[in-house]
Image (spheres, helix red, strand yellow):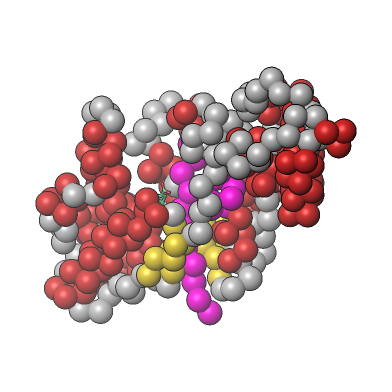
Amino acid sequence: MTRFLSGVQPSGRPHLGNYLGAIQQHVALQKDGTAYYFIADYHALTTVQNAETLREHVRDLACTYLALGLDPKRSVFWRQSDVPEVTELTWLLSTVIGMGLLERGHSYKDKVAKGLTPNAGLFLYPVLMAADILAYDADYVPVGKDQVQHVEFAQDMAGAFNALYGDVFKRPEWKLSESPRVVGLDGEKMSKSYGNDLWVFEEGKALKKRVGKIPTDSRAPEDPKDPDGMLIFDWLEMLCPKDEYEDLCRRARAGGEGGPGYGELKKRVIEGMDTMFGDARAEYHRLRADTGYVDSVLAQGASRAREHASAVRDRAYAACGLR
Ligand code: TRP
């Protein structure tokens, strides 16, 4: 059975871009193999440095994945820090990768270029990530473009370790998630750091207020409009069924009596969110209240994951002379 493995950083409430770019594919892959997914809380510590915030983000992410279709009977789902063996492997791997290679990491360089003062953890981030991947003998790592280089680093580390000590680690392959460019409420790429994101489970008044931020102009419903290049139509395309979207475009182009007003268009965006996420949203709120259940899912996942990682750790320790 093919094993897919991916980690997700608990960095705040997942937005529509996170869903369409990653979560949706993670959930879908569960039927093509064995999925191993974890909440990357060790990684998060490189940037989230407040205990309450980190706990809240971890819990929120766990409930979000479960509500959106992660099936704990079928997949292994755990919290990274419940498997401390990955930190032991991180050390071993750090001794077979050159500083120079890590210095060329895009993600690291980007963060430094943005003015972040890097801690050593941020520099070693790809090594911990390689340990995550290699600890479970993953076949494929589904990731977005920005993480491909990190998986290549993991391939390098596996190769370097194996060359020194024999066949210990399985070489992982990356699998690119098809991430559509999800536009934010202002037309830029959707991103939490731009403040233009929409939480997947936003609802009611708050949802209406967020959608209200999509800029429109002062044209009347009967004025003909070209949907191309209008942000509100990008949103409709993401959220409405195709035939409904095409019908709205046709009516907008024609204008006149049947021309849709911006109020109607925004209402359709809201309905699209309700249709796409309404059931999952109810499940999310149920799970948020059921701490015992969520904890037990993560604990069970951790014990399965740990069994695997400790066997790989033993293999690696024996190979390099630590045992
Ligand atoms: N670095 C990944 C991200 O930010 C998260 C991650 C941590 C990960 N460990 C991983 C992804 C292992 C895939 C495999 O998206």
Taking the spot 52% from the left edge, 37% from the top edge, the residue there is 190
Residue 204: image location, x then y, percent? 78, 28
Residue 71: image location, x then y, percent? 67, 60
- Left or right for 32, reference 111: right
Whether residue 119 is visible to the viewer of this picture, yes or no, is: no
The answer to which image quadrant residue 158 occupies is: bottom left
Taking the spot 76% from the left edge, 46% from the top edge, the residue there is 250
Taking the spot 49% from the left edge, 67% from the top edge, the residue there is 4
The residue most toward the top is 218
Screen quadrant of the C terminus:
bottom left
Depth check, front residue: 146 or 117: 146
Depth check, front residue: 45 or 152: 152
The residue most toward the right is 257
Residue 241: image location, x then y, percent? 76, 52
Q: Which residues are magenta?
A: 1-23
Residue 134: image location, x then y, percent? 35, 65
Check the image and report above or below for 165 versus 141. Answer: below
- Left or right for 6, reference 209: left
Check the image and report above or below for 299 versus 47. Answer: below
- Whether the magenta-drawn stretch holds residue 299 is answered as no
Check the image and report above or below for 144 versus 157. Answer: above
